[in-house]
Image (cartoon, coloured by chain):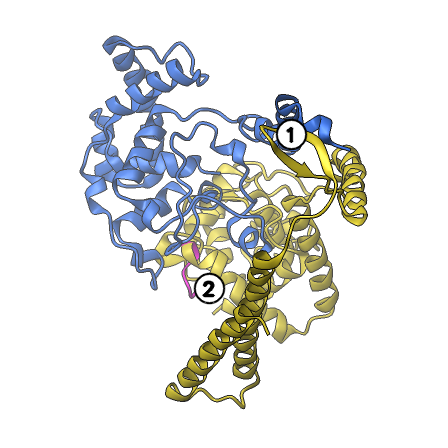
Chain colours: A yellow, B blue
Amino acid sequence: MNSFIVKGLALAGVLIVATLVVVQQMHIDLTDPINMITFIGAIAIAVLTFGVGAKYMAQMKTDTATGELAEENWDGIGEYKNELPPGWAWSFFGTMVWAVWYFLWGYPLNAYSQIGEWNKEVKEYNAKFEQVHKNASPEVLKEMGESIFLVQCAPCHGETGDGLSGKAQDFTSRFTKEQVLAVIKNGQDQLKYPMGAMPAGMAQGKDAEDIAKYVAGGLKGTAPAAWGTCAGCHGQDGKGNGGTAPDLAGYDLTLVQHVLKHGKEGIIGKMPAFPGRFTPVQEKALASYLATLKQ
Amino acid sequence: MFHWLEKNPFLFSVGVFIVIAFAGLIEILPNFAEAARPIKGLKPYTVLELAGKEVYKKDNCIACHSQLIRPFKAETDRYGQYSLSGEYAYDRPFLWGSKRTGPDLHRVGNYRTSDWHANHMWDPKSVVPTSIMPAYKHQFKNIADTETAYAEAVTVKRVFNTPYGPEIAPSKEAYEKYYKEKLLPEAKKIAKEMKNKEVEAMVNQGKVPEIVALIAYLNRLK
């Protein structure tokens, strides 16, 4: 056996013993498959490195040059003809053909797009979401509405929905008297209900006061005489005539949808619009959560 | 077979260069050229907004807030439409940030109002009880450096051809005219929305506190 190979294997042996010592010293558990695989890998690396290295070192020592000289000759230094292995050469040509396809069709037509991936992700998720929650139970909707509210609405309306003492709309009631009076005085055309704009000054003086008191009080007790003016569009019960005018009694789904879509500015301040932020199921969930806030 | 190539090293180098550069040309350059342009309808910052941007930098909002919404559903659900590189065309420098101790602010103008920001900067816990953001009350007293902001607008107009109108010009008179005719009305509008009497009084006296500039900047982020 060649002395290089012997020395190489001896070195590999030393490394293996060193590895074993480390395993012993650090109490590494070799029954664990990962540890075992790592250990076998370490031994394989040691053997291969020194074995292969030694083989070529030995070859360098004994080999003599053979082959056919190429025509080139640089100051007496020649070069053997060393043809490419055919498999390698043909794969190289193959990559050239592939490159033409890739430059002209492959990349331009099939390039990865982050936005494309986002579109796909959102579309698939929304379709699945609508599918799963198509007939969601009231409990599920309420819970979903609460988590949406806490993330998206609570920063302005407060975590309990009380409007943070007048900084935003208070969801525990529908209106304050001042709000109703302001709408009667100025009219309202922000929410784009099918009924159209509410003209300014539909009621005056005591009539307006009475209406405001009645609406702010949650439409309880007997309606004032002037209520008929309101009932014409908002319905006798004030619930908005099946979605053609805003619901004055509570926050129904139609109202939630309209406010989210158009935003709203009132005497408290301005609420921005959130078009497209929520899916239909989420809007339903929000409306059902708001209904539970009422005291 | 390829000895002729080895004998022409110059030709060989040029060939290699073309092959490698070609991929770069068709894959990188078109995207670069398109993404670097301002998106359609993007307007340069007004001087008040620029002053607010300086406040944003000075008070180090970037340490906790990012301005870059990545195209992931979880992010677009919470912060709005993903960001496009063309939206930052007039940001010098952009304030993407790399840490989100607080939420992303790139679309904050879409869903927060001037009075909300006023409440929030004065006492963050008054609107978000669990907030760990400190209060920034000094912004209600310190006067915004609108002169430097104006100089910045003049500079980017001259150096980068940012499309400002003739009202941005390098002279003291132009600045004073702009301040009175454009900047103050803009500030008054915001001060009124903030519903803060002291701030409103200050602006009416012709002084613009930092908070007004900052809110102008935040409202612009949409």
How packed is label 1: few (under 14 Cα within 10 Å), some, or many (20 or more)?
Answer: few
Front position among marks 2 and 1: 1
| Numbered disc 2: secondary structure | loop
Quadrant that contains the N terminus of chain B: top right
The residue beneath circle 1 is: A73
Determine the main secondary structure of the stretch shown in magenta. Answer: loop
Question: Is B26 left, or right, of B136 in this rendering?
Answer: right
Which residues lie in the magenta part?
A156-160
User: Between B38 and B49, which is closer to the camera in this rendering?
Assistant: B38
| Numbered disc 1: secondary structure | strand
Chain ID at mark 1 = A
Q: Which mark is residue A145?
A: none
The residue beneath circle 2 is: A172
Residue A74: x %, y % from top left: 60, 29
**In the rendered structure, which amino acid carries the disc numbered 2?**
Thr
**In the rendered structure, which amino acid carries the disc numbered 1?**
Asn
- Residue A283 included in the magenta stretch of the image: no
